[in-house]
Amino acid sequence: MSAKKNATSSRRNFIRQSSLAVAAIPLTQLSCKQKESVKEPDGFEFAFLTDIHIKPEMNAPKGFQMAIDKVNEMNPDFVLTGGDLVYDAMRGNQKKCESLFSLYQDMSKGFNMPVHNCVGNHDLFGIYEESPESEDHPDYKYGMWERYFGKTYYSFDHKGWHFITLNSLDVTENKRYKTVFHDEQMEWLKKDLEQVDKSTPIVITTHIPMICARSQLTGSKGSPNVTNSSVVFELMENHNLKLILQGHIHWKEYGHVNDRFHYIIGGSIAGNGWKGRRHNTKEGFVSIKVKGDDFTWEYIDHGWEDERIRIKKEEGSRA
Ligand SMILES: [Fe+2]
């Protein structure tokens, strides 16, 4: 099924199920399963894995390894991550955070294809009041992430598509994270887009969503979208923005806006802190198949839920 057809089916769901168009979508499986994973001759595939929250506890390395194995089996051209690679650098000390970043880096070497990482709030080093590290530390905020993975915002091209990864985070005066695309990055984005043909399909990856219906569903004030995402939409006005990939919420949501662009919130690898589903969203990742100017997507269950339940039962019977 094409992305256009996928969007059509979501509009039908809207009519059938709810007066909140996008709100109906997270509760519905909108993936368009394809019978086989044969690569299109003029297309390509990539995987989007978000909110990995790697840590040594809770069998998290086993769960992440299962996702890596599944991705390798599917053999996409590359992997995009959606941030929150580790849990947790915001409150941590140097030694603990170093071990978490090393664990993620070592494990992600297991992917058989390039990995393009994104920064999440839990990856920001020492930003919370409770962290013993100071703002003068060279790894503060983005420093540790940059030391391991390079710039927190960047772009690359792949087979005629342009991929932009953004940094959706900064720190407030009172030492909490805030959801914003900072000015320096927006200046960079403007220049980056000057080099991109108006017809080139563009994919944006951001940890904090630019669009998400969750607050409309729940009335929750938590997890706000990026506060100045309109700046990016304005810059995209005359470009072929195709898809926005988003993390942070640990749930699955798809939308298609004004026949222009699509967005996906890609579930999570970690679920609810590796204890189970979060927002009733099964742990998994997104597989995207591109053909020409169009794409299809599917949410992939890499088997962690079954394994997590099996381990729990085993531990229960030993207790
Ligand atoms: Fe997360």
Image (cartoon, rainbow, N blue to C red):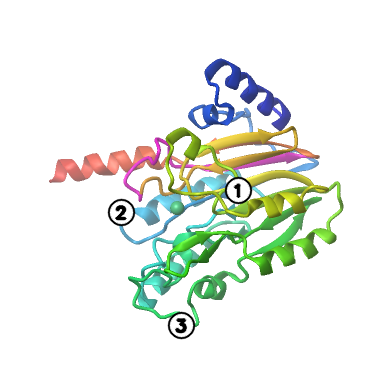
Query: Which kind of residue does numbered mark 1 sit on?
Result: Met
Question: Sequence-wise, which precedes: disc 2 or disc 3?
Answer: 2
Residue sitting farthest toward the left = 319
Say whether residue 48 is left or right of residue 6: left
Q: Residues within 10 Å of mark 1 (few under 14, many from 20)?
A: many
- State the predominant SS element of the stretch in magenta: loop
Question: Does dot 2 land on a helix, a strand or a loop?
Answer: loop
Q: Nearer the viewer, residue 103 or 89?
A: 89
Question: Does dot 1 land on a helix, a strand or a loop?
Answer: loop
Question: Sequence-wise, which precedes: disc 3 or disc 1?
Answer: 3
Instruction: For residue 78, say whether it is visible.
Output: no
Task: State the mark number for residue 58.
Answer: 2
Say whether residue 219 is left or right of residue 146: left
Q: Residue at x 35, y 49 (%)?
A: 274
Which residue does the numbered mark 3 point to in the structure image? 137
Q: Is residue 285 magenta?
A: yes
Instruction: For residue 183, say whether it is visible.
Output: yes
Quadrant (top left, top right, bottom left, bottom right) of the N terminus: top right
Q: Is mark 1 within 8 Å of ligand 1?
A: no
Inter-mark Cα distance, 2 to 3: 30 Å
Look at the image and give the residue range highlighted in magenta.
Answer: 273-291
Q: Nearer the viewer, residue 230 or 146?
A: 230
Q: Residue at x 60, y 48 (%)?
A: 210
Query: Which kind of residue does numbered mark 3 sit on?
Result: His
Say whether residue 292 is left or right of residue 107: right
Q: Is residue 115 magenta?
A: no
Inter-mark Cα distance, 2 to 1: 31 Å
Question: Does dot 3 land on a helix, a strand or a loop?
Answer: loop
Q: Position of residue 102 (x, y in %)?
A: 45, 70
Say whether residue 109 is left or right of residue 218: right
Q: Looking at the image, is mark 2 or mark 1 nearer the viewer?
A: 1
Which residue does the numbered mark 1 point to in the structure image? 210
